Image: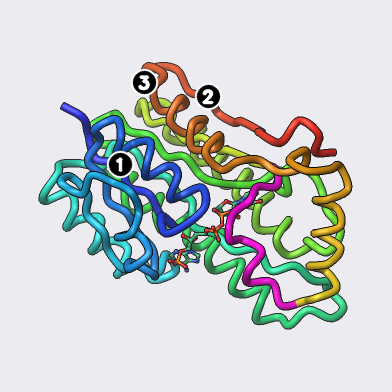
Amino acid sequence: MKKLVVITGASSGFGAETAKIFNANGYPTLLLGRNTAKIKTLPLDFTNVLVDQVDVTNYAEFKAAVRKAEDQFGQTDLLVNNAGVMLLGNVWRQDPSEWQTMLNTNVMGVLNGMQIVLDDMMAREGGTIINMSSIAGRKEFANHAAYVATKMGVHGLSETVRGEVAAKNVRVAVVAPGAADTELLTHVTDEEALATYNDWKQSMGDGGKTLDPKYVAQVVYQMYQMPQEVNIREVVIAATKQD
Ligand code: NDP
């Protein structure tokens, strides 16, 4: 019997595509996001889907939703910590509240999710956590300082926890995608940084620079399909023409 898959940030982009692939393959899923109305419009078979309104920065809310889903579907076997936000800007002029939002969502949200499922995974010696980082967790990009800090943090914390729980047969892995066509940029408030990003995206011609988010979902799915004794620890996936 297929086990419970929990996906954060399922209302758009990578999270929505990941929800679709696991749903199409018959996995019971808990789909989390703040905009649940959007999740409910996804083209899914909702017979084994639970949707819950969760802000990943709210530990209690996050935990309650996971426990409720586990009461219905059994223990979480895969947590995809995907929810994230990218607010571009230069350190010398960006509103510090934007740094805080990214730190809270991209780092605290990931830590929250990991703590919520890890006790049980370690006790039963199985389970997988896949954290969504970014190619910006592997190299620097202009106008991305605070975002880069959060995503490099995701790599650091993931690899640390991976080593700590490996002996308990629990897999922790990271996916680091390049630029993709999602709603990520819609929250950027710095017009100049946004224009620079869009120029960069277009500089290699149509379709050359960005990933279709479905490929990121496919990678997450394939990582999970490996036998439990194999952990694809990290995947960097980007459009071929991305620099
Ligand atoms: P989207 O903006 O399309 O999706 C982000 C998702 O995160 C939404 O479903 C949003 O849901 C959710 N989210 C944001 N904040 C919170 C929160 N506080 N609590 C719960 N959910 C939240 O962007 P992507 O699909 O691109 O982003 C997904 C992940 O991929 C992020 O971690 C991002 O950093 C990463 N990434 C994206 C890249 C890209 O170019 N698109 C490249 C590399 C990495 P809601 O608003 O409903 O809460």
Viewer-proximal residue among 16 and 115: 16
Which residue is pictured at 14% across the width and 44% down the height? 73
Task: Give the image location of residue 59, x and y in percent.
Answer: 36, 67
Q: Which residue was labeled with disc 2?
A: 232
Q: Secondary structure at mark 1?
A: strand
Q: Is residue 59 left or right of residue 207?
A: left
- What amino acid is at disc 1? Val
- Residue 209: percent from the left, percent from the top? 77, 42
Q: Which residues are magenta?
A: 178-189
For the residues carrying marks 3 and 1, which lies nearer the camera in this image?
Answer: 1
* N-terminal label among 3 and 1: 1
Identify which residue is drawn at 76% across, 30% down: 240
Looking at the picture, how far across and down is residue 12, in whole percent?
47, 57
**Which amino acid type is marked by label 3?**
Gln
Q: Quadrant of the C terminus?
A: top right
Residue 145 at x, y percent in the picture: 79, 62
Disc 3 to disc 2, how far (Cα)?
Answer: 10 Å
Residue 179 inside the magenta-drawn segment: yes
Q: Alpha carbon of mark 3 to alpha carbon of mark 1: how far? A: 15 Å
Kindly report the secondary structure that dominates the magenta region of the rendered protein: loop
Q: Which residue is mark 3?
A: 228
